[in-house]
Amino acid sequence: MTELGGMQQSGGLTLPAYTGAVTAAAMTKQLGMKYKTDNPMPGDFAMYSDRHVEIVEKVADGKVLSTIGGNTSDAVIRVTAPQGITHFITPPDKAGASSYNTIAQPSSSRQVEKIEQRYRVRAGAVKGGEEGAGRASGSLLSAPAFATIRLPIAVAAIKQQKGGLTQLPAADRKLLSKAVSGGQQGAIEQLYETLDNKANIKVNRIFRLAGDELTVLTTTTDGTIMPAYMTLWSADNSNLFLSKLAAGKLLDKKSTAALLKLMKQAPKSQSWGTRGPRVSGWGRDNGRLLLRQSWLQGKSALTTIVAGRSYKQTARASLAIASWLR
């Protein structure tokens, strides 16, 4: 998997060498891989969320009988009747790919590609309607969520309160405001902790409620940031989430209005060309400075992901893409 993770893509960029990055690439049809949750075949990658990977050896009646795995007691071993597999990835040669390429850009728009070239960044953009269906452009359509993960965490926190957001204790409402409007990392972590020891389960349920069957909250990290920040969230599914939230499919009417109001109160210093209810998050991924933005424009949800070598590159490219999308 490390060899696959280091495989070069077009433009001289490489895929980060960790299992979550490979899953994200397969989800967005990069590198010629195929993501699936059933019908395993010998030779497929058996993925244990974003923590571990093995190779499917034997299958019978749609069930994995054995896998070959490494990184266990410094040895390569055969695992019989493996437990905990979350999904499978068909590798490029089996998926019928002739080469390793980034996701193809629709011919209807070359604007994102032009911005990528002008600012020397990788970027992706998705614009969709009320139900999330929309068009995608660019070469970077999946990345860690970073601080934008605060939205599903906030929805989970509100849903566990009987009566919704308006019934939250004053202290929790203040915490929600700091997390959603201010994007304060400490407040986001505290809000996550209010979900107790079932936090991951509760947030993953929110993803499923939004129609996202792929995203799984990350629980491991290198210790420098909150684990959930490294959750791989495709631009498509991020956009779908925001669309469902705005349409009132995730919360009751009053809670939805209150949460969108908090998003709209985000300071201008946290906006690069976005307007209305919005959320953004910065982070470092694969040696690059990355900025994610999601916002509502009328009935459309929009999401952008930009990764550059410097703050100026990333910010200017993000502003250019957001301005184009308007």
Image: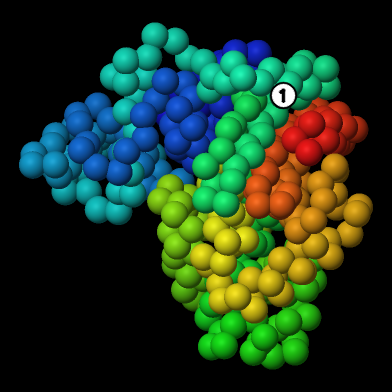
Instruction: Determine the residue located farthest toward the left in the rendered image.
Output: 61
Q: Quadrant of residue 322?
A: top right
Instruction: Determine the residue located farthest toward the front in the rendered image.
Output: 298
Say which residue label 1 marks: 112
Q: Which quarter of the rendered picture does the C terminus lie within?
A: top right
Q: Position of residue 180 (x, y in %)?
A: 74, 66
Q: Position of residue 108 (x, y in %)?
A: 62, 19
Q: Residue at the location (60% across, 75% down)?
A: 253
Q: Position of residue 261 (x, y in %)?
A: 76, 69
Residue 187 vs residue 67, the one in the foreground? 187
Tag 1: amino acid? Val
Is 165 above or below relative to 64?
Answer: below
Q: Is residue 144 left or right of residue 147?
A: left
Task: Using the rendered image of the protein, determine whether residue 232 is visible from the camera's viewpoint.
Answer: no
Q: Residues within 10 Å of mark 1 (few under 14, many from 20)?
A: many
Q: Is residue 226 left or right of residue 79?
A: right
Residue 226 vs residue 146, the one in the foreground? 146
Residue 101 vs residue 263, the one in the foreground? 263
Q: Residue at the location (58% across, 33% down)?
A: 135
Is 106 above or below relative to 66?
Answer: above
Residue 134 vs residue 190, the one in the foreground? 134
Q: Residue at the location (53% across, 80% down)?
A: 160
Q: Position of residue 207 (x, y in %)?
A: 48, 58
Task: Using the rendered image of the protein, determine whether residue 90 is visible from the camera's viewpoint.
Answer: yes
